[in-house]
């Protein structure tokens, strides 16, 4: 794939990922990671390097997307600063640990883990009425801290914004879908900023147009389109029924999970 073609694909994927991010509160990584990964593979990059660059660049592109999506859902009354205060520190710790460990993990293993993560979540969101809340409110105390670290660590390894796991935790804790999506959008802010700082400060640059593990050219193509898409998605989300938002997330997760699992065994 030529550089111009990869850039064009990045812009299109960024817009689509942003729209999805605004609609269902995710950072957009479930779209961006596979697009960058396969684009870099077709450009001649090795599997391991492509996986690391895809994850880091996706997390960096999530920064403006997450902020825009969070503000949109905050204006709609579906999230608040309290979530960032209570959950943010633990999520940030998990992300930083994962990003520091990621360069020492095989890229194919990261792809497989990401794919396996998506599949059960796709099943869960495909039939929202069959899954009842486990508790009446989001967890607190030490359980909240461990859950936050788990959300952050998984997001750091997979290149996602934390919205998927946050949505799972919030819906299982009895929050309505729209409120869960708003908090998922807030998680993207906490995940993406520390992850991007760590990725930019990586000890070695992984590709010719990169700083650390982040490909700056791809970021510049993806991030603006993704942020614009996120704004429109957040405006649309409040007018869509919760079960339809859930099924939309299920489709995105299922497709991405199968694609990444397939790539990890090729």
Image: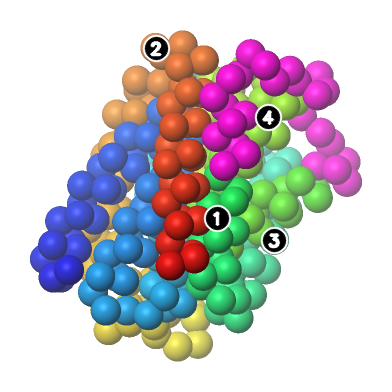
**Residue 8: x percent and y percent?**
15, 56
Residue shown at 37%/35% (left/top)? 20
Q: Tell me the CA gap for discs 1 and 4.
A: 21 Å
Residue shown at 49%/81% (left/top)? 202
Q: Tell me the CA gap for discs 2 and 1.
A: 31 Å
Label 1: few (<14), some (14–19) or many (≥20) C-alpha neighbours in 10 Å: many
* Mark 2 or mark 1, earlier in chain: 1
Give the structural element (helix, strand or loop) at label 4.
helix
Query: What's the magenta region?
Result: 119-144
Task: Using the image as rendered, state which of residue 59 and residue 83 is in the foreground.
Answer: 59
* Residue, disc 4: 170
* Residue, disc 2: 239
Q: Is residue 163 magenta?
A: no
Q: Are marks 3 and 4 in contact (CB under 8 Å)?
A: no
Vertical arrangement, residue 266 with respect to residue 245, above or below: below
Vertical arrangement, residue 114 with respect to residue 163, above or below: below
Residue lying farthest front?
266
């Amino acid at each position: 794939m030529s550089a111009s073609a990869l850039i064009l694909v990045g812009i299109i994927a960024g817009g689509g990922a942003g729209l999805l991010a605004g609609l269902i509160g995710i950072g957009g990584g479930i779209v961006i990671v596979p697009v960058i990964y396969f684009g870099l593979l077709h450009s001649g990059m090795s599997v391991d390097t492509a996986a690391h660059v895809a994850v880091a660049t996706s997390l960096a592109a999530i920064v403006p997307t997450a902020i825009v999506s969070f503000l949109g859902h905050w204006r709609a009354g579906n999230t608040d600063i309290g979530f960032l205060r209570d959950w943010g520190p633990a999520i940030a710790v998990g992300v930083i640990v994962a990003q520091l460990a990621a360069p020492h993990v095989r890229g194919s293993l990261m792809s497989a883990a990401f794919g396996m993560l998506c599949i059960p979540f796709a099943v869960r969101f495909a039939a929202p009425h069959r899954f009842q809340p486990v508790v009446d409110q989001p967890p607190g105390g030490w359980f909240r801290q461990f859950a936050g670290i788990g959300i952050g660590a998984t997001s750091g390894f997979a290149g996602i914004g934390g919205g998927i796991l946050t949505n799972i935790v919030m819906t299982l804790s009895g929050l309505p879908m729209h409120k869960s999506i708003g908090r998922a959008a807030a998680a993207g802010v906490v995940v993406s900023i520390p992850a991007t700082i760590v990725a930019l400060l990586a000890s070695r640059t992984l590709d010719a147009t990169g700083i650390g593990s982040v490909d700056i050219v791809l970021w510049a193509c993806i991030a603006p389109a993704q942020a614009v898409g996120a704004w429109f998605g957040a405006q649309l989300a409040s007018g869509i029924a919760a079960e339809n938002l859930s099924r939309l997330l299920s489709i995105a997760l299922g497709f991405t999970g199968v694609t990444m699992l397939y790539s990890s065994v090729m």
